[in-house]
Image (tube, rainbow, N blue to C red):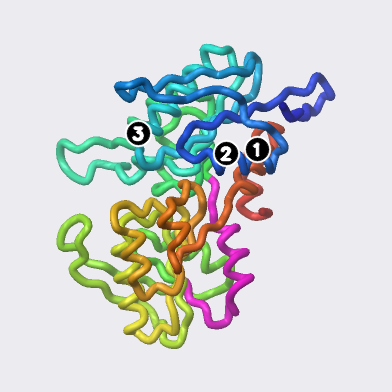
């Protein structure tokens, strides 16, 4: 089933197709439900040696196609699925191919922190372009400059409007304080604080080595406040759990966290469950695991409506940036 795309001159209406890999099919189905578009039929499976095989069963010739595939764990498999899907669509004569990546893997390798290290985010951007994508739609990139790694149009959406709505529904804004868990996330935290007219605090952490925090101090008066930690990625959960301890010791009433991408690798779910965090709120940009679904203090915000609206606006040649303010 296809959805018409309006053209200003009243000429023949174009149609869109939604294609999903295996990385987060429930999200793709939810987006399809929002747009009233069935997912394109096909198979994406593995040979015995784990090579990926893709075959599309619906005609996509001349169509405006959106491939929904976050490159989350297992990152390499899901990235290869995305590239192969794009290649299959290109060879099937799709008119335009948009890679919809709710989570952009390898985004944390966005610069050279030392000699003889790669800039893998740029490599991934090159691979997506060379595979045949015409544009990219993603959510809360770890670093904004990754948009510049692409030489094709790239829209970076923000989950902030979805989070703001949830925060306003659940808390009295008068005693809320937004907190950045590190100095690097201040811009993101300040943007959310401005949306809800709340003050801002910062947790300044000193690392002994990657993944190991030596000390953390709070910049700002959090006494008596409901503190909301804001970040784009939660991986091991160590920073969030340590920040919650420091904030509570500094007099905070309670600590919650709103994070866009719940990577939650290894024992992260158990760490969050055993922490002093009242709640961790993540989006379904990455498909929640069974452990996440059962965790007592982890909650998932759906983003199908946001992504569906962005896809619809892209297909209709309308402004996507308006979502940052109007959604």
Looking at this view, is 116 or 32 the one in front? 32
Determine if residue 188 is in view.
no
- Residue at the disc numbered 2: 28
Place residue 40 in its image quadrant.
top right
Q: In this view, does 251 lie above or below 62?
A: below
Quadrant location of the C terminus in the rendered image: bottom right
Q: Quadrant of residue 174?
A: bottom right
Residue sitting nearer the eye, 299 or 289: 289
160 in the magenta segment: yes
Compared to residue 292, the image places residue 82 above or below, namely above
Looking at the rendered structure, the secondary structure element under dot 3 is: helix
Q: Crowding at label 2, few (<14), some or many (≥20) Cα neighbours within 10 Å?
A: many
Q: At which x and y percent is residue 279?
A: 46, 70
Which residue corresponds to mark 3?
122
114 relative to 178, above or below = above
Viewer-nearest of labels 1 and 3? 1
Q: Name the residue under label 1.
A: 32
Q: What element carries label 1?
A: helix
| Residue sitting at x 68%, y 41% | 33
Reading the chain from its start, which is encountered first: label 1 or label 3? 1
Instruction: Give, as a single range, the part of the protein colored magenta.
Output: 157-178
Disc 3 versus disc 2: distance between alpha carbons?
A: 26 Å
Q: Establish if 161 lies above or below 15.
A: below
- SS for dot 2: helix
Q: Which residue is drawn at 68% across and 54% down?
A: 326
Q: Do labels 2 and 1 touch, CB within 8 Å? A: yes
């Amino acid at each position: 089933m296809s959805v018409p795309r309006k053209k200003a001159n009243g000429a023949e209406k174009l149609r869109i197709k939604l294609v999903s890999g295996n990385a987060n099919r429930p999200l793709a189905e939810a987006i399809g439900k929002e747009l009233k578009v069935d997912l394109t039929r096909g198979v994406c499976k593995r040979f015995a040696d784990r090579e990926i095989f893709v075959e599309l069963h619906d005609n996509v010739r001349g169509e405006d196609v959106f491939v929904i595939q976050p490159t989350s764990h297992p990152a390499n498999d899901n990235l290869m699925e995305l590239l192969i899907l794009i290649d299959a669509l290109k060879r099937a004569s799709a008119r335009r191919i948009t890679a919809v990546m709710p989570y952009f893997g390898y985004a944390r390798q966005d610069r050279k922190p030392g000699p003889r290290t790669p800039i893998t985010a740029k490599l991934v951007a090159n691979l997506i372009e060379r595979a045949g994508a015409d544009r990219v739609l993603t959510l809360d990139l770890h670093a904004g400059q990754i948009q510049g790694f692409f030489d094709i149009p790239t829209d970076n959406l923000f989950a902030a409007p979805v989070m703001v709505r949830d925060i306003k529904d659940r808390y009295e804004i008068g005693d809320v304080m937004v907190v950045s868990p590190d100095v690097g996330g201040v811009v993101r935290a300040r943007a959310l604080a401005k949306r809800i007219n709340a003050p801002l605090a910062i947790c300044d952490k000193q690392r002994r080595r990657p993944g190991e925090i030596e000390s953390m101090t709070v910049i700002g008066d959090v006494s008596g406040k409901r503190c909301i930690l804001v970040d784009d990625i939660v991986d091991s959960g160590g920073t969030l759990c340590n920040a919650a301890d420091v904030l509570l010791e500094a007099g905070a009433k309670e600590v919650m966290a709103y994070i866009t991408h719940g990577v939650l690798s290894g024992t992260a779910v158990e760490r969050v469950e055993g922490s002093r965090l009242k709640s961790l709120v993540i989006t379904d940009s990455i498909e929640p695991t069974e452990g996440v679904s059962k965790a007592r203090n982890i909650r998932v915000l759906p983003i199908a409506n946001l992504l569906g609206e962005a896809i619809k606006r892209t297909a209709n040649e309308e402004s996507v940036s308006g979502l940052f303010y109007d959604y």
